[in-house]
Image: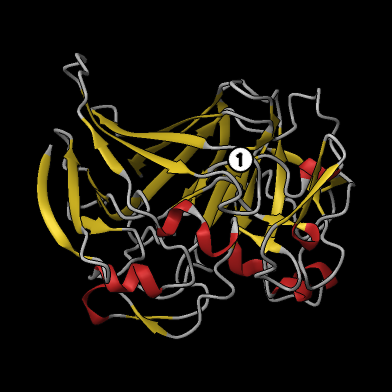
Amino acid sequence: MKKEVFGETKTGSTVTAYTLENKNGISATIIDFGATVTKLLVPDKTGVARDIQLGYDSVAGYEDGECFFGAIIGRNANRIKDGRVSIDRVVYQMEQNDNENNLHSGPNGVDKKMWTYLPNSDTDADSDSVTLICKSNDKEQGLPGNVTMTVTFSLNDDNEFKITYDAVSDMKTVINMTSHMYFNLNGHYKGNVENHFVTLDSDYYNPVIDFKAIPTEENAPVAETVFDFRNPKQIGDEVNSSELQLEYVGGYDHNFIIKGSTGEVRHFATVYAEESGIVMDLFSDQTGTQFYSGNCIGDQKGKGGFDYHNRSGLCLEPQYIPNAMNFIPEDSVDSPIFEADQHYHTESIYKFSTK
């Protein structure tokens, strides 16, 4: 593992970059501001490494950015209706930072905090890892409890980039973490991902009520809809169609229920870019994944001064069903409400190959 100074925050904290590399030429760089993946280099079908992660060259970019490029999201990922959560008949009000709803925990999410590096005693010779820890204080996001979150990034010689999440609170609260990496398998500078083929192991998705993007409580069949990715399909095939669900959010920004059981690591998705030949397979143990086609990136400068636009990258965010704390029974394995001292644990694996 290589460590180097990445920059400095506006408040004077030194930001360190940690780079993991395997024997096959894949490398991942993570900074301790937001536990953010800033770079992910993967060799293409000709052996040339491409950086497939959208991001910024400076700490200021991540401090000011509103797209959550590469960041860990917590303590809650996705949207909460009206920013309200009821726990044991007490209503907690979070900041309404997205169409009257709370998105990704609001401005006090851990994506904008400094994390602390924890020395790792990993003895696996084929693995390299970085562990970061962060604390979210009681009511910091409007939610109860002091929550300690630990995230470990690892890279092995089987070309698996793994993110392991652990957390515990001293009060009953919501915990639902994810990574907000934006992928463009042709390279972050290559513009549009509509030519990427996506496969999702999902028979059901969660429709949204309206443009505010809060899902209904329905698990709707994907069959015979634009949401059917059970076989490989290019994002651009139907993303611009007149389907109302897509018009509400400008493309795909929906949760897909993945086959199998929550807590069971299983295959979630495959993404393939024909130009580079890079294939990414996603595995996780979560309930589902938010598939976001980068509809609201907007026009901005990314790494190397390259221009980013809408659909310059796509996100696959393993997590509980959005707003689940407001309609999934607490005793369900699919509920993101955790008792005091109850251990939250989940993991996601991004495996790379070429064809």
Residue at the image point whose x is 53% and y is 47% from the top: 74
In the foreground, 37 or 84: 84
Q: Quadrant of residue 54?
A: bottom left
Image x and y of residue 60, in percent: 29, 73
Image x and y of residue 71, in percent: 42, 54
Residue type of the residue flagged with mark 1: Asn
Residue at the image point whose x is 90% and y is 47% from the top: 218
Q: Left or right of 220: which side holds 310?
A: left
Q: Is 295 situated above or below 344?
A: below
In the foreground, 316 or 231: 316
Q: Is 252 situated above or below 297?
A: above
Residue at the image point whose x is 39% and y is 41% from the top: 134
Q: Is 211 situated above or below 216?
A: below
Q: Which residue is mark 1?
A: 176
Residue at the image point whose x is 68% and y is 70% from the top: 98
Q: Secondary structure at mark 1?
A: loop
Q: Which residue appears farthest toward the top when viewing the image?
A: 123
In the foreground, 113 or 231: 113
Q: Left or right of 2: which side holds 155?
A: right
- How many marks are shown on the rendered structure? 1
Within 10 Å of disc 1 (Cα), the crowding (few <14, some 14-19, many 20+) is many
Q: Is residue 43 visible?
A: no
Q: Left or right of 12: which side holds 62?
A: right
Q: Quadrant of the C terminus?
A: top left
